[in-house]
Amino acid sequence: MNANDDKALRLSVWRNAAAALLFPRRYCFNCGCLLPAPLSEPALCPDCRARLADARSCLHCATFLEDEQASVCNECLHERPPFAAAFAALPYAGRLRDNLLDLKYRDKTGRRHGAGELLYLAYLRHYADKGALLLTAVPGSPSRTARRGYDHAQLLARELAMRSGLPLDAGLLERVKDTPPLAALSRSERAFVLKGAIRANEGAAGQSVLLIDDIYTSGATTSACAQALLKQQAAAVYVLTVSAGVN
């Protein structure tokens, strides 16, 4: 390599480094494909935006339905939840699942921006016509929140508040009893563990509350939150999550 070639190579490296700094690549938060215009495009590629608009969910909760003939998931056939409605942006799978696990367990709090944009898109689709809503988040386990140093659901609620302009009451709900992870528990075990674990304050009275979380699974935690809010005379409780399971 001669001196001119070496100089050209160094200039190319510097140009690429500058471009990466000024115009960082962005990837679809749901499927991981490269977005064509890093600074102007949203967190979703066109295909995933279409999936968000076309996704079908249970009439009573956020669970997505695979069966085109079904209108209610298996859980809600057994017992309808206490909240007025629940929706999620997209199914809990693939790159979206990895991104949410990064946010929740791996200290990658920057993932909140893409997740917040998905929440906002879902809010526009499902709740923008509901009028005045008060945002709050599902409260995390005190011990796990202390270990992480942040509450991921609170981060998501703040992201939606910034995008939507809705007021946020971060202290409307409190988890007064530490609970173990619920994933391995049955429906009845989850209900038993969560009994008396969540409390709402008097600020819920008369409010239409939009409850925010990352994932809707069985609905046990969101139901416990809704019951606490309704006990304090909330006018209505709605649920919005970034993702949900598929039934």
Image (tube, rainbow, N blue to C red):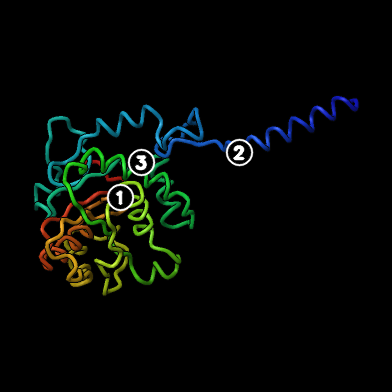
Q: Residues within 10 Å of mark 2 (few under 14, many from 20)?
A: few
- Could one spot residue 90 in this view of the protein? no
Badge number at residue 129: none
Q: Is mark 3 on a helix, strand or loop?
A: loop
* Mark pair 2, 1: CA separation: 29 Å
Amino acid carrying mark 1 in the image: Gly
> Circle 2 is placed at which residue position?
22
According to the picture, the residue beneath numbered tag 1 turns out to be 165
Q: Mark 3 points at which residue?
A: 93
Q: Foreground residue, 80 or 181?
A: 80
Residue 132 vs 206, above or below: the answer is above
Place of residue 131 in the rendered image (x, y in percent of width and height, measured from the top left): 17, 47
Occupied quadrant, residue 51: top left
Name which residue type carries label 2: Leu
The answer to whether the residue labelled 3 contacts the one labelled 2, judged by CB atoms less than 8 Å apart, is: no
Q: Please give the name of the residue rendered at 42% of the width and 47% of the height, measured from the top-left corner.
A: 113
Q: Is residue 162 left or right of residue 232?
A: right
User: Which residue is pictured at 24% across the width and 55% down the height?
Assistant: 211
Q: How far apart are marks 3 and 1 (CA)?
A: 29 Å
Q: Is residue 85 above or below residue 141?
A: above
